[in-house]
Amino acid sequence: MDLLANLALGFDVALSPANLLYCFIGVTVGTFVGVLPGIGPMATISMLLPITFGLDPIGALIMLAGIYYGAQFGSSVTSILLNIPGHAAAAVICLDGHPMAKQGRAAVGLVGSAIASFIGGSLAIVLVMQFAPPLAKLALNFGPAEYFSMMLLALLAAAVLSEGDLLKGLGMVLLGLSIGIVGIDVNSGAQRLIFSNWNLADGISFVIVAMGFFAISEVMSNLEPHAKPQMIGSNFTWRELVPSWRDFRQAFGSIIRGWGIGSMFGALPGSGPTIASFVSYSVEKKVARDPSRFGKGALEGVTGPESANNAAAVAGFIPTLTLGVPGDAIMALMLGALMIFGIQPGPSVITDNPELFWGLMASMWIGNFLLLILNIPLIGIWVRVLSIPYRILYPSILLFICIGVFATNNNSFDIVLLAAFGAIGYILHKLDCPAPPLLLGVILGPLIEENMRRALLINRGDPMVFITHPISLAMLVAGALIIVLFIVSGARARRKERQADDAPAAVD
Amino acid sequence: MIVTKDTASGLIFVAAGALVVIEAQGHPMGTLLRMGPAFYPTLIGGLTIFVGAALIVRSFLKGSVPVPKIAWRELALLIGAILVAAVSLNRLGLVISTVLLVGISRLAVRPMHWVGTLVLAGVLAVVAVVIFWWFLQLPIPLWPWS
């Protein structure tokens, strides 16, 4: 089978001593820059890209794959330890990863996240090899109506996935979509919601929103006069790194489901890791025997999305390379970097440049593997970060976040925005309004508008187009089902609560 | 009247939605076939107002939890520290901005240790210079005169 030949070719390229060394350097530097709180994968990759210049294209690609994985993992580390997601998909990791850290189970979360991304990513490579050509063909059938419905599904899933209130989740999605409107409209040139401030002309980067709504808001919650910010992390032993049989059983299924979800969403052009992680989380919560554990440190809430994220990143190379449509901002950055090294996206990239394509696939695998080897010993060090007294930790976090936000555009107005979103984020957090749906809204906002416009334009302004296209209809039905299931299960839970309350009701 | 979590968040959503809708009216609306730049914001803003209103109505019908205490002093110090850093980074340079950011934000936690804070600010300034200025070569001046 030529699959094996391709794989052999890829590994042959990637396993030369020099390339292994490049990959190792990439993973190491990527991890160390990526774990700085506030410096997400976007900033890490763009700041470290120049160190790959001057290598031969394949060596550079392999180092880049290493940086990519290092940066991604670094972002998971800050998400779990400090509730600071470096990129959109990591916002999902925060939901259960950070509660794990607060319970002193940070090491389990970190190991789980590293292993889940390794398994999800490596299995996805197998899938990519098997199905790259037919998937690329399926993706071509996706029109604007399908994209619109897919994004709507993701937004609805995000609104219900976070703990609690559907109305607040929806409100936060809409608030995120509103933030996504800010900037110059690409179709008409209209300056929307920028109030004559030219710093807003290019829109608001989701990095700033994420840092404000997650990181600053988290620091604020810990600074409240009666808060107990000290997390449990000092009594770390190496034995904690070995997952218990229960952990393993819980995590394994979620990793496999995450792999399936990630591969599917990654292969679709325009969706990618972010949507895959959000969907994976809601699936885990749905299939769990006891959904109430979620948001309080459920391991599957970390491993599922982490596996989906990585599978989607790997599978995402199909649309990114064959159609030139990256799945999220990080993939867009990777695509830009690949183009610097002479990979021109197009349907023939796999056949024309086999060493590059398969070398890239193999180096993704090796990058992920080296990451595992490098980081398992380092986890002990990362966990010790938690034993730093908070009065020393938080000014350092603030400093890194401010400079990280500044570094993405070299514009100090972004730090002003950070302050604004931090204040709003803290207040909304106090009102129990969940931040992840808002973040997804900010990211998908411009895309959903664009696809809605295009779908209606192609179909002469007839809004029925979203229902008459079968794939689009299926996504809308799935979205409606999510809402209905949520309301029904919420009502049942409330009834149960009331029955439980009835007996000791005399107390108040 | 006690403001509840639901009414407060509902009011925020209504206000934000109204802002989006009103701002959008300065742009052409267009038609379903050829949407103008006002169409989508009006839709989104309208939905936001609707959700906000639903929250307010629900809190009147079913009640909700009172708004918890918000740590205004800490919030002001933290946000103030970030704003000072935003203004000073390009004017006073990395070293002084770091010291200002650390010093102001550290005031949020009592008791305040001046010596410890100065040491922390100094160490962080060195770390910031090494990582961001020397290693990652970000275009930030080090000092007011550089």
Image: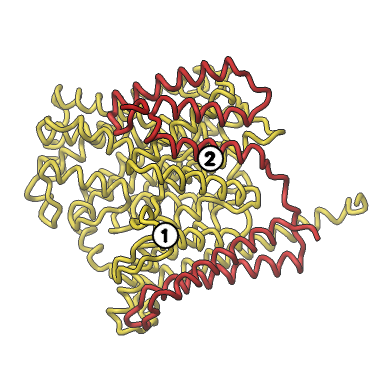
Chain colours: A yellow, B red
In the displayed structure image, the side of residue A441 where residue A465 appears, left or right = left
Quadrant where the image shows the C terminus of chain B: top left
Q: Is residue A486 above or below residue B42?
A: above
* Amino acid type shown at disc 2: Ile
In the displayed structure image, the side of residue B66 where residue A138 appears, left or right = left
Residue A62's quadrant in the figure? top left
Residue that mark 1 sits on: A180
Q: Residues within 10 Å of mark 2 (few under 14, many from 20)?
A: many
In the displayed structure image, the side of residue A411 where residue A225 appears, left or right = right
Residue B105's quadrant in the figure? top right
Can residue B20 be seen here? The reply is yes
Write the residue at 76% across / 67% down: B60
Judging depth in this view, the residue of A493 and A199 nearest the camera is A199
Write the residue at 50% across / 56% down: A158
In the image, residue A318 lies at what x, y percent? 22, 52
Can residue A111 be seen here? The reply is no
Judging depth in this view, the residue of A198 and B49 nearest the camera is A198
N-term-proximal mark, 1 vs 2: 1
Q: Are the residues flagged by discs 1 and 2 in contact, CB closer than 8 Å?
A: no
> In the displayed image of the protein, which residue is found farthest to the front?
B145
In the image, residue B135 lies at what x, y percent? 29, 24
In the image, residue B34 lies at what x, y percent? 32, 80
Q: Secondary structure at mark 1?
A: helix
Q: Secondary structure at mark 2?
A: helix
Q: Chain of mark 2?
A: A
Residue that mark 2 sits on: A216
Q: Chain of mark 1?
A: A
* The label number, if any, that marks residue A409 in the structure image: none
